[in-house]
Image: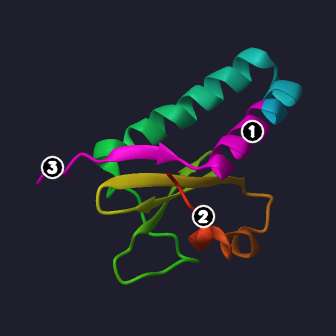
Amino acid sequence: MVANERKKVVLSTEFLTDIKAVFDYGEETFGYNAAKTFVSEIYMHVWNLDSQYLFFPEVRFLPTITKKYRNIILGSYLIIYRIQKEKVEVLRIFHSSQCIPKNLSPIKRIKVD
């Protein structure tokens, strides 16, 4: 198997807002340590995208010819990212209780610096 080219991983403002909400919910529901551990696991998956960006499947609600929109399923959460020529853009994280197709419609317009 050929190794993937390494790409820079960048986080959108929307993802950073989402991850704070994930932590806050986790802390309130399960306690600080559990929330911290879960968010650390999320970040581990996100930072590993630098070389493993092709490992995860295409987002079935955002099909493209290039399959550039992909997702990671982690517990009850769906992490959406976009593969660009020189970087991987982590766009959003959603809980499964949210209406995923409705929330994905504006995802293509997210700008990441």
Nearer mark to the viewer, of 1 and 2: 2
Q: Which residue is mark 2?
A: 110
Nearer mark to the viewer, of 3 and 2: 2
What percent of the width, then of the height, locates residue 4? 20, 52
Q: Residue at x 47, y 41 (%)?
A: 46
Dot 3 or dot 2, earlier in sequence = 3
- Disc number for residue 3: 3
- Disc number for residue 22: 1
- Furthest toward the top, the residue is 33
Amino acid type at image mark 2: Ile
What percent of the width, then of the height, locates residue 64? 43, 81
Residue 111 among magenta residues: no
Dot 1 or dot 2, earlier in sequence = 1
Q: Residue at x 51, y 70 (%)?
A: 59
Please tell me how crowded label 2 is: few (under 14), some (14-19), or many (20+) other residues with Cα within 10 Å.
few
Say which element carries label 3.
Answer: loop
Please tell me how crowded label 3 is: few (under 14), some (14-19), or many (20+) other residues with Cα within 10 Å.
few
Q: Is 62 on the left-hand or right-hand side of 92?
A: left
Where 64 sits versus 18, above or below?
below
What percent of the width, then of the height, locates residue 42? 56, 36
